Amino acid sequence: MLRAVLLAMTLLLGACAGHTPVPVSSPALTAALPISLQIERTQSAEQRDWLLVIQAEGEALRWSLFDPLGVPLARQLLQDGEWRNDGLLPPNAEARELFAALLFALSTDDALTAYPAGSWQRGADGQRRLNPDWLIRYRSALDFTLAAPQLSYRVCALNQEEGN
């Protein structure tokens, strides 16, 4: 019985430790909302293209991920540091981790203090690291790569017409 309890506690702690942190309040971002991003997901030899739209919804941020045909893959609301499903789509753990890493990557330098101490590092070369596994390599504020073990996302802003 004691072994089962210890195993359950270990699994629970391991699951908690593996999640990408988010700040309690929405940080200042490097671009004005709404933001539309093209995401190229690469894992092994498989590549997928997605569209992500980030919008303000009162005090919350709405994250909507679509495939190239416009079919929704994930919709989440981030409010008070907690993710909530938005709509009838099933939970998507990969999307939540991606959204959390993107929020960090899109946060201004000053806003990084909203993240838990010790959960991130900023390199002299402009790269950022976010625990547990994310490395962000910037080409510009809205053109960067998020890399995790055996998985990477190339992120860039969709072309927007002038005046928007």
Image (spheres, rainbow, N blue to C red):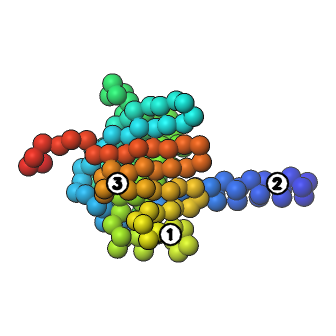
Question: Vertically, is 47 above or below 143?
Answer: above
The Cα–Cα distance between marks 2 and 3, rounded to whole angstroms, is 44 Å
Q: Mark 3 points at which residue?
A: 139
State yes or no: discs 1 and 3 in contact (Cβ < 8 Å): no
Q: Earlier in the sequence, mark 1 or mark 2?
A: 2
Asked if one can make out residue 126 in the rendered structure from this viewpoint, the answer is yes
Place residue 31 in its image quadrant: bottom left
Disc assigned to residue 121: 1
- Amino acid type, callout 1: Gln
Left or right? Give the position of 71 relative to 121.
left
Q: Earlier in the sequence, mark 2 or mark 3?
A: 2
Residue nearer the viewer, 14 or 125: 125
* Amino acid of disc 3: Arg
Mark 1 lies on a secondary structure that is strand
- Circle 2 is placed at which residue position? 7
Which residue is more in the foreground, 8 or 133? 133
Q: Is residue 131 above or below residue 65?
A: below
| Residue 132 spot, x, y in % from top left | 59, 59
Mark 3, other Cα within 10 Å: few <14 / some 14–19 / many ≥20: few
* Sequence-earlier tag: 1 or 3: 1
Q: Where is residue 2 in the image (x, y as percent from the top left)?
A: 90, 58
Q: Which residue is drawn at 70% across and 59% down?
A: 13
Real-space CA distance between mark 1 and mark 2, rounded to the nearest whole angstrom: 32 Å
Decide: few, some or many residues near mark 2? Use Cα within 10 Å; few <14, some 14-19, many ≥20.
few
Kindly check if marks 2 and 3 are in contact, taking CB atoms under 8 A apart as contact.
Answer: no
How many numbered marks are there? Answer: 3
> Mark 1 to mark 3: distance in Å?
18 Å
**Quarter-wise, where is residue 127 in the image?**
bottom left
> At x 38% / y 35%, what residue is drawn?
50
